[in-house]
Amino acid sequence: MDLRGGDLSRLRQLNSLTAIRALRAAGPLTLSALADRAGLSRPSMKEVVDELTSLGWVEEVPPSPGTMGRPARRYRFRADSGHLVGVDIGGHNVRAALSDLDGHVLTETRQPVEPDAPLDERLAAIERAVSGCLAASRKNPADLWALAAGSTGVITPDGRIALSKAVPAWTGLDLAGRLREMFPCEILVENDSRLAALAEFRRGVARDARDVVFLHVGRRMGAGLIIDGKVHRGFGVAAGEVALLPELRWFDAPEHLNTCAAVPPGTPPEDAAGHTLAAARSGDPVALEAVGRYVDDLAVGTAAMVLLLDPQMVVLGGGFSRSADVLLPPLRDRLERRCVRLPEIRASTLGDECVVVGAIDHAVEHVGRRFFTPDAGPLPLSR
Amino acid sequence: MDLRGGDLSRLRQLNSLTAIRALRAAGPLTLSALADRAGLSRPSMKEVVDELTSLGWVEEVPPSPGTMGRPARRYRFRADSGHLVGVDIGGHNVRAALSDLDGHVLTETRQPVEPDAPLDERLAAIERAVSGCLAASRKNPADLWALAAGSTGVITPDGRIALSKAVPAWTGLDLAGRLREMFPCEILVENDSRLAALAEFRRGVARDARDVVFLHVGRRMGAGLIIDGKVHRGFGVAAGEVALLPELRWFDAPEHLNTCAAVPPGTPPEDAAGHTLAAARSGDPVALEAVGRYVDDLAVGTAAMVLLLDPQMVVLGGGFSRSADVLLPPLRDRLERRCVRLPEIRASTLGDECVVVGAIDHAVEHVGRRFFTPDAGPLPLSR
DNA sequence: CTCACTTACGAAGGAAGGCTTCATTAGTAG
DNA sequence: CTACTAATGAAGCCTTCCTTCGTAAGTGAG
């Protein structure tokens, strides 16, 4: 339990934080508007803003003309006083994106990797991807405040890969440690499904929901949970492993799409499901039946989650969510029959960038938490 | 998002709250100890405590003798400045308990009710149970700050019974409204499994866990979730309805115990399961096999919850938890085979009083939230 | 019983942060 | 050019907390 009482300086901290949050939430604001939102008087808010300006957090912008009376000075949060990187370490690609402190993406890069590439080559691809981002925006590693990386598999709280079925060579790697050697900033490592869920919650279709179930449907199945506005990790950081229970029929569900007769012979296995979904969209009855069997299985695990958590929204994401038009109607139908209350069911809109921007959002949250936690050490202030 | 900034008075509020929380957590404390815990100076803490004393929240107790130096004055939270009632509305009994603001139970009563009693009779039993508590402690309804009631079924946020399978006449009742007519205090209504989970989390075997799955095993199956230290209700207040998914095999699970050949003929149906469990404890192979099949089913739904949430602890509660010695070993065995990480699995220790004390804890939390939420109106101060 | 020692109490003075008030200033409108 | 409007910035006040220091109320040794 938090038993810290308050000092005068704590009050100022609180008010500074409030000012920054208001500025981040609503863009450039005048002193009066800011004071109004925060419930402070104008003179007090001025003091706060002056301090924040001298610290480099806040900056004045030109006043908006054309108003009655003396134009008010306007201030904005200096989101560019630091930068963040998000990385998505996938089987075939490493994606990286550079953003400012508000999570606005400035640059994005992609580095292809062979699925069976050795460990060092994969790490080198990460370095190339991130360096590419930095170069494209004319930044250098010292501008980075935090780097968040997403990877499949079970990831320990200290950033090691406990188990990766998709990339076996990855298992046991101290990913956070290796990244820390590459970049001189804070390093965060997190499961990719959870980052995708976070992205949809922060900037995707689930923006207004507090409890979200994110379904990662693709060649592998996964789930990410947002509960009460926070990513749920679980005590052993293993939440969301629904696919491991045979009764929930998730693990083998994609097979229905892979082994469908509608797939032309000779198709590489990673493209088979895509063919089936495309054929189903154009009405092929064989493909439609395969999709039906797939959704039957998908719905069982999903219904379990919905009945257990009663979320506000279910978001369909991952590779197959491109075919949401084919998958959503039957999924809704199956769930309606099984659930007490059918939550909203939507398709992801973020697509392939889901995990990268989720990583960035993760870094944004992390920096936000550290804003005024004095014990955590100073942030790299810009001036 | 909370954008309220702070005034000096807010700081004082914060410090008052801190003082009260410290006193509630650690019993009578001296001024220095209190100041130390809260991070305030002694003179400031004195000011705070003086104010709280004059408001009736805090009271001085005799100093502890035998110490070096001048004896320090000691203060305690006046938990008796208000009272709370918890009610458990079960099929065969209505239980009520009266507690102080810290949730210490002062009196308990029980009123038997026929399972098929008409609605008004059940409501009358509630009134008798609560009045009995009040009378036994020489309190009157005006001393009550809050009454929390637990009932089976799906309960809407405003305290109506949306659906009750156990007590059909209950369905559609505006329980909160009826209780509000009986008692002039705040009324809370909540699902009983959730209250039981809360009780185990606040004062039972799950005290140190932040994420808990509570299994309500008995003639009906239910689940209550504690996630991140809070009861999880779900968007439609329908979380925990695992039994409704056939694939999770919860709904019919108790039948294995009811229809066991080890039950003597002529046993009333509500006692059958008890006989089976007793026979299993004494080694009857037929009963043991029935218990095995029961646990097989129980483990499927439980594994789904564990895999999805990765809780720190699973607590077995409800009527059958009296036979935890028979159920836990096989349950642990089944789960170990299915789960990534086996959480701690324990039996409830609160027994039949689980729901009543959970209701009290619910009321305690509610009052605690309102302590210094000025907008919510004043609390009934004692003097 | 007295004196030294220990520890808490309580009053005084000072610093920090917030609030209100009011004359001043920089725009727009006619 | 003048009237009007709305933000600015300086002055003075109140609340809350901090530090400092002399005083009070116990214990324990001689």
Image: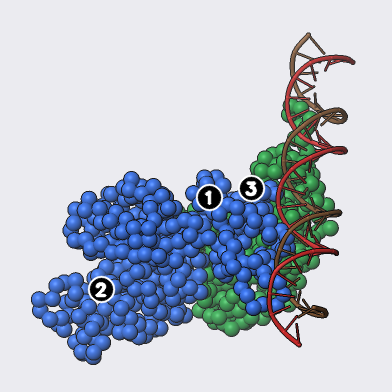
Chain colours: A blue, B green, C red, D brown
Provide the secondary structure element on which disc 2 rests. loop
Q: Position of residue B58 (x, y in %)?
A: 77, 50
Numbered disc in front, either 3 or 1: 1
Q: Amino acid at mark 2?
A: Ala
Q: Earlier in the sequence, mark 2 or mark 3?
A: 3
Q: Which mark is residue B78?
A: none
* Residue at position x 30%, y 68% in the image: A221
- Could you tell me how far apart the alpha carbons at marks 2 and 3 are, in whole angstroms? 51 Å
Q: Residue at x 23, y 91 (%)?
A: A283
Q: Are marks 3 and 1 on the same chain?
A: yes
> Is residue B189 depicted above or below C5 in this figure?
below
Q: Position of residue A49 (x, y in %)?
A: 64, 58
What's the amino acid at mark 1? Arg
Q: Is residue B338 visible?
A: no
- Relative depth, front residue between B58 and B329: B58
Which of pointers 3 and 1 lies earlier in the amino acid sequence? Answer: 3
Above or below, A381 relative to D8: above
Residue located beneath label 2 in the image:
A253
Residue in the picture at 49% in, 49% down: A380
**Callout 3 secondary element:** loop
| C-beta proximity under 8 Å, tags 2 and 3 | no
Do the CB atoms of the residues marked 3 and 1 lie less than 8 Å apart? no
Residue with the mark numbered 1: A383
